[in-house]
């Protein structure tokens, strides 16, 4: 499809400009259908209606990396919502980057992002600017069976370009994990397209907090400068340590951006609806306390 577009741009640049949104729609449709088939809790038709856009980069196996940007609106307006322009008069709404599915076999970490997106229309979350990637590792989730690593067999959460990567990442993998193939950090820092894309999005979006969802340890983890969250729903803070190449290390330690890691209790069974809501409510309360809208 994208090769066809490049050719079209050569022949008729205006046609290509019209074709690009169509290509994005087609890409979204295929992506939503695949997710709907893989995850019982994702409705493909509802997903198709959400304004996801494909990133410039694709996964190792050529799947789109989809992003939804939700700009802030002013609260309690009785007319149509008015966008707060980021940077206008020095005011910039707080920015939250929500990421699911870095590990492809943690199915709940993708599903819960779709559940939580249903709450973005509520007044409090809409005061913030959200950047949402429900599935950072589509090749892992859509493999049969689903696998933790990406299309190159790399654990993306050990592949971020942390300053300690060259010195520690491969040594840690060899000595501490016994060369566990599920935890292979890659041949070089940021060697994977999915990792590079997330790093670029972090650089451009400049989030005030990154929320990364995993499973199945049933805890909260935190790296970064602000007050640590103590408890979201039944998940208590239990800092698991800092690993070479992890997102917590890259964002929280290296870039000084708070990174909340939510470890759901099961990789394939969703928390109850009540627990899903409680985790969201507690997360939002932490955000409201620590990040200006
Ligand atoms: Zn994980």
Image (tube, grey):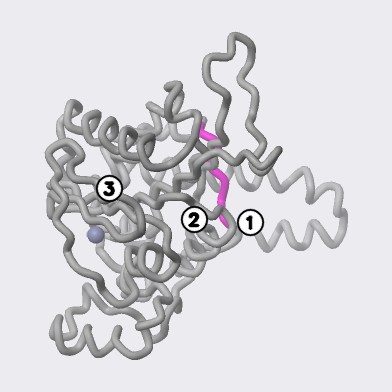
- For the residue labelled by badge 1, is the local secondary structure a helix, a strand or a loop? loop
> Which dot, 2 or 3, sits closer to the camera?
3
Question: Which residue corresponds to the image point at 45% horizontal and 21% vertical from the top-left?
Answer: 123
User: Which x, y percent locates residue 171?
Assistant: 24, 90
Quick check: which quadrant has ligand 1?
bottom left
Question: Mark 3 = which residue?
Answer: 109
Q: Quadrant of residue 239?
A: bottom left
Question: Which residue corresponds to the image point at 50% horizontal and 69% vertical from the top-left?
Answer: 196
Question: Mark 1 = which residue?
Answer: 1
| Alpha carbon separation for disc pair 2 and 3 | 16 Å
* Residue bounds of the magenta highlight: 50-55
| Alpha carbon separation for disc pair 3 and 1 | 29 Å
- For the residue labelled by badge 2, is the local secondary structure a helix, a strand or a loop? strand
> Which dot, 3 or 1, sits closer to the camera?
3
- Note whether 174 is above or below 267 in the view shown: below
Decide which of tag 3 and tag 1 comes sooner along the chain. Answer: 1
Decide which of tag 2 and tag 1 comes sooner along the chain. Answer: 1
Q: Is residue 61 visible?
A: no
| Alpha carbon separation for disc pair 2 and 1 | 15 Å
- Note whether 17 is above or below 6 in the view shown: above
**In this rendering, position of residue 289 left or right of residue 240:** right
- The answer to whether the beta carbon of the residue marked 1 is less than 8 Å from any atom of ligand 1 is no
């Amino acid at each position: 499809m994208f090769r066809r577009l490049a050719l079209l741009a050569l022949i008729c640049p205006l046609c290509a400009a019209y074709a690009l949104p169509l290509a994005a729609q087609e890409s979204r449709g295929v992506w939503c259908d695949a997710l709907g088939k893989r995850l019982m809790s994702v409705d493909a038709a509802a997903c198709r209606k959400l304004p996801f856009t494909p990133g410039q980069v694709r996964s190792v196996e050529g799947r789109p990396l989809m992003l939804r940007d939700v700009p802030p609106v002013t609260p309690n307006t009785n007319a149509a919502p008015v966008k707060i322009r980021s940077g206008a008069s020095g005011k910039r709404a707080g920015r939250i980057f929500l990421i699911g599915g870095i590990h492809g076999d943690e199915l709940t970490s993708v599903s819960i992002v779709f559940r939580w997106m249903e709450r973005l229309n509520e007044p409090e979350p809409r005061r913030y600017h959200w950047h949402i990637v429900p599935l950072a590792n589509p090749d892992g989730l859509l493999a049969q069976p689903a696998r933790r690593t990406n299309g190159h067999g790399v654990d993306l959460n050990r592949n971020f370009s942390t300053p300690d990567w060259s010195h520690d990442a491969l040594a840690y993998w060899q000595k501490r994990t016994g060369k566990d193939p599920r935890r292979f950090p890659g041949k070089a820092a940021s060697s994977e397209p999915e990792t590079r894309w997330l790093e670029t999005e972090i650089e451009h979006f400049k989030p005030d907090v990154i929320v990364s969802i995993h499973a199945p340890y049933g805890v909260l983890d935190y790296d970064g400068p602000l007050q640590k969250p103590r408890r979201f729903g039944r998940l208590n803070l239990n800092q698991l340590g800092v690993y070479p190449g992890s997102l917590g290390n890259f964002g929280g330690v290296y870039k000084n951006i708070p990174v909340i890691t939510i470890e759901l209790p099961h990789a394939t069974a969703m928390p109850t609806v009540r627990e899903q809501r409680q985790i969201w409510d507690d997360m939002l309360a932490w955000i409201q306390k620590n990040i200006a809208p």
